């Protein structure tokens, strides 16, 4: 590199870093600058060794929009930031209104399908209903196969898990799993994990909902099961608790600049967690969430401090 070119490069880099820190870059440039700061952390899927970026995306609510609406246009920017920032996992469900259709359209619009790790679900009460639902999911998602097929909230799992495995044998999905979203589902989920071979589970885990860490997360490690985390924000209620609360003094040490990042980093700091899947339809929030997947994780002491802090709130 010529000397004058190097000086321009260094000056431009310094300006970009300063603007990024001050939040003055336009959103697309901020997203690219964040991506340039380093790749997202990854974790392996135990059953295969395939690496996944630790920050993914949920779609419940946020992706249930009309095609062509202003909300859909915002999601086009959301998924661009998501994929260009190095993320892959998008979790959806036939139960999430128009989300499957919107995901399929967004991936087609941006040419993102090859980068996407689609996780969808079976939410049916019979084999016939599941077969019809799967056919419809392929149409709506605009794909003949997905990366992960999950039995939604353990619904009819005795019939639906074998069906998911059959689809896996046919090459229609790479991985199978089961999901739940409340403490009430953890005991049955534990029993299933002990009795069945699973690639994935999906559960809730947050600074105010840590029961999964008592038995289910350690069991996932022991059984070699990947873990997706939903409700890391407790359906948004955590943000009301920190409205006027400053971040801990050590936040900068782990690269955290927002409470959203702190809540996500708390989840991925558990060694059993593979990916956390927050949902958002706002580009600026998507860019912010990706930052949680870079830099140091929280120490055990920092995690415990957060749990104590919110237990007392």
Image (tube, rainbow, N blue to C red):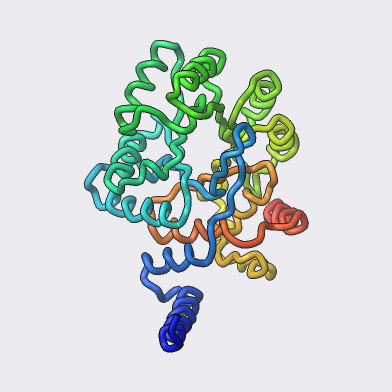
- Out of 178 and 170, give the one closest to the viewer: 170
Q: At 46% across and 83% down in the image, what residue appears?
A: 6
Q: At 70% across and 56% down in the image, what residue appears?
A: 306
Above/below status of 263 relative to 88 = below
Assign the N terminus to one quadrant of the image.
Answer: bottom left
Q: Is residue 186 left or right of residue 4?
A: right
Query: Which of the 4 image quarters holds residue 225?
Result: top right
Assign the C terminus to one quadrant of the image.
Answer: bottom right
- Out of 219 and 212, give the one closest to the viewer: 219
Q: Position of residue 301 (x, y in %)?
A: 77, 57
Above/below status of 153 relative to 86 = above
Residue positioned most to the front: 2
Q: Position of residue 196 (x, y in %)?
A: 65, 20
- Out of 237 and 85, give the one closest to the viewer: 85
Q: Is residue 223 left or right of residue 142?
A: right
Q: At 48% across and 61% down in the image, what residue appears?
A: 288
């Amino acid at each position: 590199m010529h000397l004058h070119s190097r000086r321009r490069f260094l000056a431009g880099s310094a300006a970009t870093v300063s603007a990024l820190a001050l939040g003055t870059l336009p959103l697309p440039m901020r997203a690219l600058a964040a991506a340039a700061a380093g790749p997202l952390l990854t974790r392996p899927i135990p059953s295969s060794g395939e690496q996944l970026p630790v920050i993914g995306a949920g779609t419940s609510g946020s992706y249930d929009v009309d095609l062509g609406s202003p909300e859909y246009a915002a999601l086009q920017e959301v998924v661009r930031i998501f994929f260009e920032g190095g993320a892959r996992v998008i979790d959806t469900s036939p139960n999430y209104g128009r989300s499957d259709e919107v995901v399929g359209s967004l991936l087609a619009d941006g040419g993102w399908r090859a980068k996407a790790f689609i996780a969808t679900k079976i939410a049916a009460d019979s084999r016939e209903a599941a077969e019809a639902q799967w056919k419809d999911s392929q149409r709506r998602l605009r794909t003949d196969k997905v990366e992960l097929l999950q039995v939604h909230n353990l619904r009819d799992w005795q019939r639906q898990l074998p069906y998911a495995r059959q689809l896996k044998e046919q090459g229609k999905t790479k991985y199978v799993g089961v999901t739940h979203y409340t403490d009430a589902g953890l005991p049955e989920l534990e029993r299933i994990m002990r009795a069945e071979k699973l690639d994935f589970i999906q559960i809730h885990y947050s600074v105010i909902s840590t029961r999964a860490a008592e038995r289910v997360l350690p069991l996932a490690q022991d059984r070699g099961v990947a873990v997706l985390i939903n409700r890391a924000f407790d359906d948004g209620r955590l943000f009301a608790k920190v409205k006027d609360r400053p971040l801990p003094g050590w936040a900068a040490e782990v690269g955290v600049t927002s409470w959203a990042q702190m809540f996500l980093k708390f989840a991925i700091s558990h060694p059993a967690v593979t990916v956390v899947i927050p949902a958002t339809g706002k580009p600026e929030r998507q860019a912010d969430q990706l930052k949680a997947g870079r830099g140091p994780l929280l120490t055990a002491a920092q995690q415990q401090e957060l749990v104590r802090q919110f237990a007392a709130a």
